[in-house]
């Protein structure tokens, strides 16, 4: 690694710390619950998109089935809590582990498929999971599961009225995904994965083991996605297959990463910061009429950003950051 | 479970399978031509269904008579989508694969919103017509006439697509698919071929949509379910293969109908998903795919 790369990585790290600090103080002056909630959802999706980015962006495997791992995480932590009394602070890790295991299980057959065949196979696997959970009574079927409230606690990750603890919870989660992506970007793995994405034949000829690379990326990606699902379940207090496993979610998770800039450190955060507020605000102010204006705005935004900034919104911020990965892609 | 019920389900699956096949054929055509998976395919079908519904409501004519009008409209719409969006998505320099996925996905959301805006969320249906609500009975098996008419029309449209592939235009399509750069050297306008390919793909799904509207409710979300079936059908048959789409469509229609019989109707899609995964495990490019 030459000096310029080291310098760039040091800048990224300083930037990361600055953003983290800014996001940590951001909610302090904000009093109204709506805005607090909006920020929490935005940060949660920034983390989820970063988790997807590890597999989809760095390793180039366009998974459209991440709702499955999200749902696994949500169900595992919730059911452990409801059925066995295991607090979600641990259940979150268990949910992440099951999410990662799920990603390995899906990846094992599906990574043989290339391009659109892989994408569609992941859609199908996600749909199977959703259908099975809808019809599986032990996990609540279509009626879902309520998370019982047992008093404010960091162990149970429950806070009746306070939003601030959730803010720090999702911020910690998003920061963890960012650090994972940062470490991957500078590691041997990260270089191998990007080689798999760009030209797997060339990568193989240089001794990169394709299948293990994809599996490792999938496991990490699935782990964080499952964790995000567990956090979401505790935050919302109620889960059912439509809210934590539906196909739409499999698109919502990668969307911030794609529009912000795939395979970049900052893309998922920037994408989420633009996309989630637009979608939430337009839904609140225009969606109530049921006339679909919010959907039209949201759809148009996706089309325009994808066409005008195919390398992602991150490219608006200086050429250096976007440039390095744009050249690679 | 008597033989009668199984036969009834099998015939229902056959009729539905032909519709699936035509929906998938449009998707497969576009993919084969330019490596683009149209994630708004189900929404194009929904537009055709609404177009048939509106024309029927205004004119009171039989939906079968309205079919040609809708097909022409859909052809134009398909070309418009290509010229307005897809041509741009294909010309980007970065992340082309992801850009096209998410551009067509954005389009799908936009169309869904627009349908909601124009028609509200209610389920609507076409209630009159030569075949509306009529059933024939042959040897104890009930044949709902709208489904029979729909599957016959879809079969005819499929034959039409195969015929087109034999014409000079069809050869130009094939040549463009084989090598999109070389065709420019022999005087084929690639952009025009792509646009016409989108027109054909949209027209195909338009025919399926109109026929579906004669017996299926129309709502802004009707496309989503059919689209997933269409992706599975295309991937099962092999991207870019028309024959594959036909075989896979019929197979999926049957598997779905029989799964609904053996398991519960709410699980009817599980069967086709499992069959699909089992097939691509052994044939990663689908049954007849070469791409």
Image (cartoon, coloured by chain):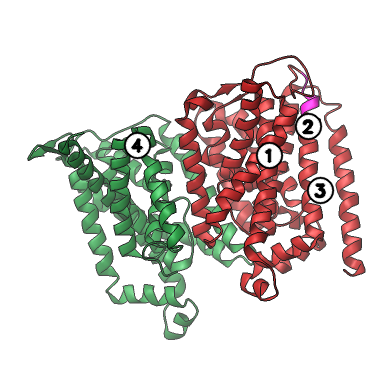
Q: Nearer the viewer, mark 3 or mark 1?
A: 1
N-terminal of the pair, mark 2 or mark 1, is: 1
The residue labelled by disc 4 is B218
Point out residue B252 in the picture as x, y percentages from the top left corner: 33, 49
Tell which subunit mark 1 falls on. A
Based on the displayed image, in which of its 4 quarters is residue A174 positioned?
top right
Q: Nearer the viewer, mark 1 or mark 4?
A: 1
Quick check: B164 left or right of A216? left
Q: Which chain is red?
A: A
Instruction: Measure the alpha-carbon separation of dots 2 and 1.
Output: 15 Å
How many residues crowd around disc 2 within 10 Å: few (fewer than 14), some, or many (20 or more)?
A: some
**Same chain assignment for discs 3 and 1:** yes
Segment colored magenta: A162-166
Secondary structure under the numbered disc 3 in the rendered image:
helix
Point out residue A43 in the picture as x, y percentages from the top left corner: 74, 38
N-terminal of the pair, mark 3 or mark 2, is: 2
The residue labelled by disc 1 is A96
**Same chain assignment for discs 1 and 4:** no
Residue at x 46%, y 62% (from the top left corner): B284
Residue A179 is marked as 3
Point out residue A65 in the picture as x, y percentages from the top left corner: 55, 46
The residue labelled by disc 2 is A169
Q: Nearer the viewer, mark 4 or mark 3?
A: 3
Q: Which secondary structure class fits the magenta region best?
A: helix
- The reply to whether callout 4 and callout 2 are in contact (CB within 8 Å) is no
From this view, report whether residue B214 is shown above or below residue B38. Answer: above
Can residue B75 be seen by looking at this rendering?
Answer: no
Instruction: Measure the alpha-carbon separation of dots 3 and 2.
Output: 15 Å
Instruction: Measure the alpha-carbon separation of dots 4 and 3.
Output: 47 Å
């Amino acid at each position: 690694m030459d000096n310029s790369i080291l310098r760039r990585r040091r800048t990224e790290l300083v930037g990361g710390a600055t953003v983290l600090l800014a996001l940590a103080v951001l909610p302090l002056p904000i009093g109204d619950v709506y805005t607090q909630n909006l920020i929490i959802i935005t940060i949660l999706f920034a983390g989820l998109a970063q988790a997807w980015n590890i597999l989809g962006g760095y390793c180039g495997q366009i998974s459209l089935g991440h709702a499955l791992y999200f749902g696994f995480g949500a169900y595992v932590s919730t059911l452990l809590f409801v059925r066995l009394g295991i607090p979600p602070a641990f259940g979150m890790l268990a949910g992440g582990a099951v999410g990662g295991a799920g990603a390995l299980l899906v990846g094992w057959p599906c990574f043989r498929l290339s391009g659109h065949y892989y994408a569609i196979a992941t859609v199908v696997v996600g749909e199977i999971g959703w259908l099975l959970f809808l019809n599986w009574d032990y996990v609540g079927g279509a009626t879902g599961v309520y998370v019982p409230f047992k008093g404010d606690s960091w162990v149970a990750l429950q806070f009746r009225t306070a939003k601030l603890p959730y803010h720090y919870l999702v911020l910690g989660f998003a920061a963890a995904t960012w650090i994972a992506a940062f470490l991957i970007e500078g590691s041997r793995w990260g270089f191998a994965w990007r080689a798999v994405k760009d030209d797997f034949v060339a990568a193989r000829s240089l001794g990169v083991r394709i299948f293990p690379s994809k599996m490792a990326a999938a496991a990490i990606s699935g782990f964080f996605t499952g964790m995000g699902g567990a956090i979401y379940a505790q935050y919302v207090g109620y889960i059912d297959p439509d809210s934590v496993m539906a196909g739409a979610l499999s698109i919502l998770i990668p969307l911030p990463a794609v529009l912000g800039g795939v395979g970049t450190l900052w893309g998922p955060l920037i994408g989420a910061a633009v996309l989630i507020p637009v979608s939430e605000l337009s839904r609140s102010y225009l969606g109530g009429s049921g006339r679909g204006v919010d959907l039209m705005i949201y759809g148009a935004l996706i089309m325009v950003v994808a066409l005008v900034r195919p390398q992602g919104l991150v490219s608006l911020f200086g050429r250096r950051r976007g440039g390095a990965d744009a050249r690679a892609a | 479970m008597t033989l009668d019920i199984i036969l009834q389900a099998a015939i229902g699956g056959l009729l539905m399978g032909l519709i699936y096949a035509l929906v998938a054929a449009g998707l497969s055509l576009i993919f084969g031509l330019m490596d683009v998976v149209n994630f708004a395919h189900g929404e194009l079908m929904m537009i055709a269904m609404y177009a048939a519904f509106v024309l029927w409501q205004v004119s009171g004519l039989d939906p079968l008579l309205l079919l040609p009008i809708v097909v022409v409209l859909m052809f134009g719409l398909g070309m418009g989508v290509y010229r307005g969006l897809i041509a741009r998505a294909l010309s980007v320099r970065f992340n082309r694969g992801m850009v096209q996925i998410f551009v067509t996905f954005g389009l799908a959301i936009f169309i869904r919103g627009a349908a909601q805006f124009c028609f509200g969320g209610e389920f609507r249906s076409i209630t009159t017509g030569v075949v509306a609500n009529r059933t024939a009975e042959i040897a104890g098996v009930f044949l709902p006439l709208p489904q029979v008419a729909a599957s016959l029309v879809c079969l005819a449209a499929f034959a039409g697509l195969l015929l087109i592939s034999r014409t000079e235009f069809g050869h130009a399509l094939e040549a463009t698919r084989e090598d999109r750069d070389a065709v420019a050297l022999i005087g084929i306008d690639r952009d025009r071929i792509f646009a016409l390919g989108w027109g054909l793909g949209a027209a195909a799904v338009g025919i399926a949509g109109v026929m579906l509207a004669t017996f299926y409710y129309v709502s802004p979300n009707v496309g989503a379910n059919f689209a997933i079936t269409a992706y599975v059908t295309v991937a099962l048959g092999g991207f870019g293969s028309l024959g594959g789409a036909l075989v896979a469509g019929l197979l999926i229609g049957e598997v779905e109908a029989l799964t609904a019989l053996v398991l519960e109707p709410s699980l009817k899609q599980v069967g086709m998903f499992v069959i699909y995964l089992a097939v691509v495990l052994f044939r990663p490019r689908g049954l007849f795919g070469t791409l």
